[in-house]
Protein backbone atom coordinates (compact mmCIF):
# COMPACT_ATOMS: atom_id res chain seq x y z
CA UNK A 1 0.00 0.00 0.00
CA UNK A 2 1.37 3.46 -0.81
CA UNK A 3 2.05 5.75 2.17
CA UNK A 4 -1.32 7.17 3.22
CA UNK A 5 -1.02 10.95 2.94
CA UNK A 6 -3.44 12.65 5.37
CA UNK A 7 -6.57 14.32 3.96
CA UNK A 8 -5.75 17.64 2.35
CA UNK A 9 -2.15 16.61 1.56
CA UNK A 10 -0.50 14.72 -1.24
CA UNK A 11 2.44 12.37 -1.05
CA UNK A 12 5.74 13.76 -2.35
CA UNK A 13 8.11 11.02 -1.29
CA UNK A 14 8.15 8.15 1.19
CA UNK A 15 11.34 8.64 3.22
CA UNK A 16 11.21 5.34 5.09
CA UNK A 17 10.46 3.73 8.43
CA UNK A 18 12.57 3.66 11.58
CA UNK A 19 11.87 1.75 14.79
CA UNK A 20 8.87 3.90 15.70
CA UNK A 21 7.87 6.20 12.87
CA UNK A 22 7.09 5.78 9.19
CA UNK A 23 8.07 9.07 7.60
CA UNK A 24 7.10 10.73 4.32
CA UNK A 25 7.23 14.13 2.69
CA UNK A 26 3.79 15.50 1.86
CA UNK A 27 2.55 18.74 0.37
CA UNK A 28 -0.53 20.63 1.48
CA UNK A 29 -3.09 21.16 -1.24
CA UNK A 30 -3.37 24.71 -2.52
CA UNK A 31 -0.51 26.92 -3.70
CA UNK A 32 1.80 24.56 -5.55
CA UNK A 33 5.01 26.02 -4.16
CA UNK A 34 4.16 25.51 -0.46
CA UNK A 35 7.14 23.76 1.19
CA UNK A 36 6.77 20.05 1.76
CA UNK A 37 6.10 18.88 5.31
CA UNK A 38 7.31 15.77 7.09
CA UNK A 39 4.46 13.40 7.96
CA UNK A 40 5.06 10.87 10.73
CA UNK A 41 2.86 7.85 11.34
CA UNK A 42 3.48 4.91 13.68
CA UNK A 43 4.97 1.73 12.22
CA UNK A 44 2.59 -1.28 12.48
CA UNK A 45 4.68 -2.84 15.30
CA UNK A 46 3.82 -0.01 17.73
CA UNK A 47 0.57 1.31 16.20
CA UNK A 48 -1.57 -0.28 18.90
CA UNK A 49 1.06 -0.18 21.65
CA UNK A 50 1.17 2.32 24.48
CA UNK A 51 4.88 2.94 23.72
CA UNK A 52 4.01 4.02 20.16
CA UNK A 53 1.29 6.41 21.19
CA UNK A 54 3.52 7.80 23.96
CA UNK A 55 6.36 8.44 21.46
CA UNK A 56 4.02 10.34 19.17
CA UNK A 57 2.54 12.43 21.98
CA UNK A 58 6.02 13.14 23.38
CA UNK A 59 7.20 14.33 19.97
CA UNK A 60 4.15 16.56 19.47
CA UNK A 61 4.36 18.05 22.97
CA UNK A 62 8.12 18.50 22.87
CA UNK A 63 7.88 20.33 19.53
CA UNK A 64 5.06 22.58 20.65
CA UNK A 65 6.89 23.45 23.90
CA UNK A 66 10.47 23.74 22.64
CA UNK A 67 10.53 26.25 19.82
CA UNK A 68 14.02 26.59 18.41
CA UNK A 69 15.36 26.90 14.86
CA UNK A 70 17.24 23.60 15.24
CA UNK A 71 13.99 21.69 15.79
CA UNK A 72 11.19 21.00 13.33
CA UNK A 73 8.12 23.18 13.86
CA UNK A 74 4.91 21.29 14.57
CA UNK A 75 2.28 22.01 11.91
CA UNK A 76 -0.58 19.64 12.68
CA UNK A 77 -1.58 16.66 14.84
CA UNK A 78 -4.35 14.41 13.59
CA UNK A 79 -5.74 10.93 13.20
CA UNK A 80 -7.53 9.09 10.41
CA UNK A 81 -8.39 5.48 9.66
CA UNK A 82 -4.65 4.69 9.36
CA UNK A 83 -3.98 5.94 12.89
CA UNK A 84 -2.50 9.10 14.41
CA UNK A 85 -0.11 11.31 12.45
CA UNK A 86 2.02 14.42 12.88
CA UNK A 87 2.90 17.05 10.31
CA UNK A 88 6.06 19.03 11.01
CA UNK A 89 8.47 21.19 9.07
CA UNK A 90 11.27 19.46 7.22
CA UNK A 91 14.79 20.10 8.49
CA UNK A 92 16.96 20.60 5.42
CA UNK A 93 20.29 18.88 5.24
CA UNK A 94 21.98 15.54 5.62
CA UNK A 95 22.46 13.46 8.75
CA UNK A 96 25.97 13.32 10.21
CA UNK A 97 25.94 9.63 9.24
CA UNK A 98 25.33 10.55 5.58
CA UNK A 99 27.85 13.41 5.66
CA UNK A 100 30.54 11.07 7.00
CA UNK A 101 29.61 8.31 4.53
CA UNK A 102 29.77 10.87 1.71
CA UNK A 103 33.36 11.81 2.57
CA UNK A 104 34.32 8.16 3.01
CA UNK A 105 32.91 7.48 -0.45
CA UNK A 106 35.38 10.07 -1.74
CA UNK A 107 38.13 8.17 0.06
CA UNK A 108 38.95 10.77 2.69
CA UNK A 109 37.76 11.98 6.07
CA UNK A 110 35.79 15.22 6.42
CA UNK A 111 38.15 18.24 6.32
CA UNK A 112 39.39 19.55 9.67
CA UNK A 113 37.55 22.86 9.29
CA UNK A 114 34.24 21.02 8.80
CA UNK A 115 34.88 18.76 11.79
CA UNK A 116 35.60 21.71 14.08
CA UNK A 117 32.58 23.62 12.79
CA UNK A 118 30.18 20.68 13.21
CA UNK A 119 31.40 19.83 16.69
CA UNK A 120 31.16 23.38 17.96
CA UNK A 121 27.79 24.09 16.33
CA UNK A 122 26.23 20.82 17.52
CA UNK A 123 27.34 21.33 21.13
CA UNK A 124 26.14 24.95 21.02
CA UNK A 125 22.75 23.88 19.64
CA UNK A 126 22.32 21.37 22.44
CA UNK A 127 23.35 24.03 24.99
CA UNK A 128 20.67 26.40 23.66
CA UNK A 129 18.02 23.68 23.84
CA UNK A 130 19.01 22.78 27.39
CA UNK A 131 18.63 26.45 28.35
CA UNK A 132 15.17 27.00 26.81
CA UNK A 133 12.67 28.59 29.17
CA UNK A 134 9.09 29.78 29.07
CA UNK A 135 6.95 31.70 31.56
CA UNK A 136 6.88 28.58 33.75
CA UNK A 137 10.68 28.39 33.97
CA UNK A 138 13.23 26.07 32.36
CA UNK A 139 11.68 23.53 29.96
CA UNK A 140 14.02 20.75 31.04
CA UNK A 141 14.38 19.74 27.40
CA UNK A 142 15.91 16.28 26.85
CA UNK A 143 16.14 14.87 23.31
CA UNK A 144 16.62 11.32 24.53
CA UNK A 145 17.87 9.75 21.28
CA UNK A 146 20.81 11.73 19.92
CA UNK A 147 22.93 9.89 17.37
CA UNK A 148 24.33 10.36 13.85
CA UNK A 149 20.91 9.76 12.24
CA UNK A 150 19.22 12.49 14.28
CA UNK A 151 21.78 15.30 14.03
CA UNK A 152 21.50 16.99 10.64
CA UNK A 153 23.94 19.36 8.99
CA UNK A 154 21.98 22.01 7.09
CA UNK A 155 22.99 23.70 3.82
CA UNK A 156 24.18 26.81 5.69
CA UNK A 157 26.18 24.86 8.24
CA UNK A 158 23.33 24.98 10.74
CA UNK A 159 22.63 22.00 12.97
CA UNK A 160 19.17 20.42 13.14
CA UNK A 161 17.90 17.77 15.55
CA UNK A 162 15.09 15.41 14.56
CA UNK A 163 13.17 12.47 16.08
CA UNK A 164 11.68 13.75 19.32
CA UNK A 165 9.97 10.41 19.98
CA UNK A 166 12.09 9.82 23.09
CA UNK A 167 12.06 13.45 24.29
CA UNK A 168 11.40 14.45 27.91
CA UNK A 169 10.40 17.88 29.24
CA UNK A 170 9.09 19.67 32.31
CA UNK A 171 5.61 18.68 33.40
CA UNK A 172 5.46 15.62 31.13
CA UNK A 173 2.51 13.38 31.98
CA UNK A 174 4.03 10.40 33.92
CA UNK A 175 1.93 8.14 31.70
CA UNK A 176 4.22 9.14 28.79
CA UNK A 177 7.29 7.82 30.65
CA UNK A 178 8.04 4.54 28.85
CA UNK A 179 11.04 2.26 28.52
CA UNK A 180 12.31 3.98 25.30
CA UNK A 181 16.03 4.38 25.69
CA UNK A 182 17.88 5.94 22.77
CA UNK A 183 20.24 4.01 20.51
CA UNK A 184 23.43 2.15 21.40
CA UNK A 185 26.35 2.79 21.31
CA UNK A 186 25.39 6.46 21.76
CA UNK A 187 23.08 6.15 24.77
CA UNK A 188 24.73 6.69 28.17
CA UNK A 189 25.29 3.42 30.04
CA UNK A 190 23.14 4.24 33.09
CA UNK A 191 20.22 5.05 30.74
CA UNK A 192 20.79 2.00 28.52
CA UNK A 193 20.70 -0.20 31.64
CA UNK A 194 17.41 1.37 32.73
CA UNK A 195 18.89 2.80 35.95
CA UNK A 196 18.00 6.33 34.86
CA UNK A 197 15.39 7.85 32.56
CA UNK A 198 16.77 9.97 29.69
CA UNK A 199 18.50 13.05 31.17
CA UNK A 200 20.21 16.24 29.99
CA UNK A 201 23.53 14.72 31.03
CA UNK A 202 22.65 11.68 28.95
CA UNK A 203 22.10 14.01 25.96
CA UNK A 204 25.57 15.51 26.47
CA UNK A 205 27.04 12.00 26.49
CA UNK A 206 25.10 10.97 23.37
CA UNK A 207 26.09 14.15 21.53
CA UNK A 208 29.75 13.69 22.50
CA UNK A 209 29.66 10.06 21.31
CA UNK A 210 28.02 11.14 18.03
CA UNK A 211 30.66 13.82 17.48
CA UNK A 212 33.60 11.54 18.31
CA UNK A 213 32.24 9.06 15.75
CA UNK A 214 31.98 11.91 13.21
CA UNK A 215 35.45 13.30 13.95
CA UNK A 216 37.22 9.93 13.82
CA UNK A 217 35.09 7.85 11.45
CA UNK A 218 35.96 4.90 13.70
CA UNK A 219 33.43 2.56 15.38
CA UNK A 220 32.83 3.25 19.09
CA UNK A 221 32.57 -0.44 19.99
CA UNK A 222 33.93 -3.73 18.67
CA UNK A 223 30.49 -5.32 19.09
CA UNK A 224 28.00 -4.79 16.29
CA UNK A 225 24.83 -5.96 17.95
CA UNK A 226 23.00 -4.11 20.76
CA UNK A 227 23.16 -6.65 23.62
CA UNK A 228 26.87 -7.27 22.99
CA UNK A 229 27.50 -3.52 22.78
CA UNK A 230 25.93 -3.01 26.19
CA UNK A 231 28.18 -5.69 27.70
CA UNK A 232 31.28 -4.25 26.02
CA UNK A 233 30.49 -0.69 27.15
CA UNK A 234 29.85 -1.98 30.70
CA UNK A 235 33.21 -3.75 30.75
CA UNK A 236 35.52 -1.35 28.95
CA UNK A 237 33.56 1.78 27.97
CA UNK A 238 33.56 3.21 24.47
CA UNK A 239 36.64 2.81 22.27
CA UNK A 240 38.09 6.28 22.04
CA UNK A 241 41.65 5.47 20.82
CA UNK A 242 40.97 6.91 17.36
CA UNK A 243 40.36 10.31 18.94
CA UNK A 244 44.12 10.67 19.60
CA UNK A 245 44.61 10.88 15.81
CA UNK A 246 41.82 13.45 15.23
CA UNK A 247 44.16 16.27 14.30
CA UNK A 248 41.34 18.74 13.71
CA UNK A 249 40.99 18.94 17.51
CA UNK A 250 43.42 20.24 20.11
CA UNK A 251 44.45 17.88 22.94
CA UNK A 252 42.26 19.92 25.32
CA UNK A 253 39.24 19.58 23.02
CA UNK A 254 39.75 15.82 22.86
CA UNK A 255 39.99 15.68 26.67
CA UNK A 256 36.72 17.65 26.97
CA UNK A 257 34.94 15.08 24.78
CA UNK A 258 36.43 12.16 26.72
CA UNK A 259 35.24 13.73 29.96
CA UNK A 260 31.69 14.03 28.58
CA UNK A 261 31.87 10.27 27.93
CA UNK A 262 32.87 9.21 31.44
CA UNK A 263 31.13 6.02 32.49
CA UNK A 264 30.16 7.67 35.78
CA UNK A 265 27.56 10.41 35.19
CA UNK A 266 28.79 12.28 38.31
CA UNK A 267 32.22 12.74 36.70
CA UNK A 268 30.91 14.11 33.40
CA UNK A 269 30.52 17.76 32.47
CA UNK A 270 27.17 18.87 33.86
CA UNK A 271 25.72 20.47 30.71
CA UNK A 272 26.27 21.10 27.03
CA UNK A 273 27.21 24.70 27.94
CA UNK A 274 30.00 23.41 30.21
CA UNK A 275 31.23 21.18 27.37
CA UNK A 276 31.10 24.12 24.95
CA UNK A 277 33.08 26.32 27.36
CA UNK A 278 35.73 23.60 27.77
CA UNK A 279 35.83 23.10 23.99
CA UNK A 280 36.27 26.82 23.31
CA UNK A 281 38.82 27.31 26.09
CA UNK A 282 40.94 24.60 24.45
CA UNK A 283 40.54 25.91 20.87
CA UNK A 284 43.87 26.31 19.09
CA UNK A 285 44.81 30.03 18.90
CA UNK A 286 45.45 31.13 15.39
N1 LIG B 1 11.49 16.96 10.57
C1 LIG B 1 12.33 16.21 9.84
N2 LIG B 1 13.06 16.77 8.85
C2 LIG B 1 13.88 16.04 8.07
N3 LIG B 1 14.04 14.70 8.22
C3 LIG B 1 13.34 14.06 9.18
C4 LIG B 1 12.45 14.78 10.04
N4 LIG B 1 11.90 13.88 10.91
C5 LIG B 1 12.43 12.68 10.59
N5 LIG B 1 13.28 12.77 9.55
C6 LIG B 1 14.03 11.68 8.89
O1 LIG B 1 13.31 10.47 9.00
C7 LIG B 1 14.05 9.50 9.74
C8 LIG B 1 13.11 8.68 10.58
O2 LIG B 1 12.40 9.53 11.47
P1 LIG B 1 12.52 9.32 13.04
O3 LIG B 1 11.75 10.38 13.72
O4 LIG B 1 13.96 9.20 13.41
O5 LIG B 1 11.79 7.92 13.24
P2 LIG B 1 12.19 6.69 14.22
O6 LIG B 1 11.86 7.14 15.61
O7 LIG B 1 11.35 5.58 13.80
O8 LIG B 1 13.65 6.46 14.08
C9 LIG B 1 15.07 10.31 10.54
O9 LIG B 1 16.21 9.55 10.87
C10 LIG B 1 15.37 11.45 9.58
O10 LIG B 1 16.29 11.01 8.60
MG1 LIG C 1 14.98 7.82 14.52
Image (tube, rainbow, N blue to C red):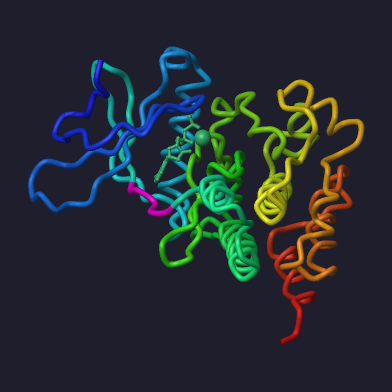
Give the dominant element type of the magenta stretch: helix, strand or loop: loop
Q: Is residue 22 left or right of residue 252?
A: left
Question: Residue 13's image quarter?
Answer: top left
Relative to 208, is 82 above or below? above
Residue 120 point in image, percent of width and height: 63, 66
Relative to 193, is 70 above or below? below
Residue 82 point in image, percent of width and height: 28, 17
Question: Residue 177's image quarter?
Answer: top right
State the residue at coordinates (28%, 40%): 76
Q: Residue furthest right?
A: 235
State the residue at coordinates (85%, 50%): 241
Q: Is residue 267 left or right of residue 171?
A: right
User: Is residue 81 in the magenta section?
Assistant: no
**Which residues, given as a range, are shown in magenta?**
89-93
Quarter that holds the N terminus: top left
Where does ligand 1 appear, by image quarter?
top left
Question: Residue 230's image quarter?
Answer: top right
Q: Nearer the viewer, residue 138 or 159?
A: 159
State the residue at coordinates (36%, 34%): 15
Residue 18 point in image, percent of width and height: 48, 28
Relative to 278, is 4 above or below? above
Amino acid sequence: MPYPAPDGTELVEHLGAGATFDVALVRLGGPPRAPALVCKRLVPRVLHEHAGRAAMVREAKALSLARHPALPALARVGADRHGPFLLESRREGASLRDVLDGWRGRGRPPPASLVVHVLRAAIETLAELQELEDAGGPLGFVHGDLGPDHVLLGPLGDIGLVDLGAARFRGMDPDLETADRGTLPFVAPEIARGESPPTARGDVYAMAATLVAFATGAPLTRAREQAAMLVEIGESGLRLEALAAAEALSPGQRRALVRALDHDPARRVESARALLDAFDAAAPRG
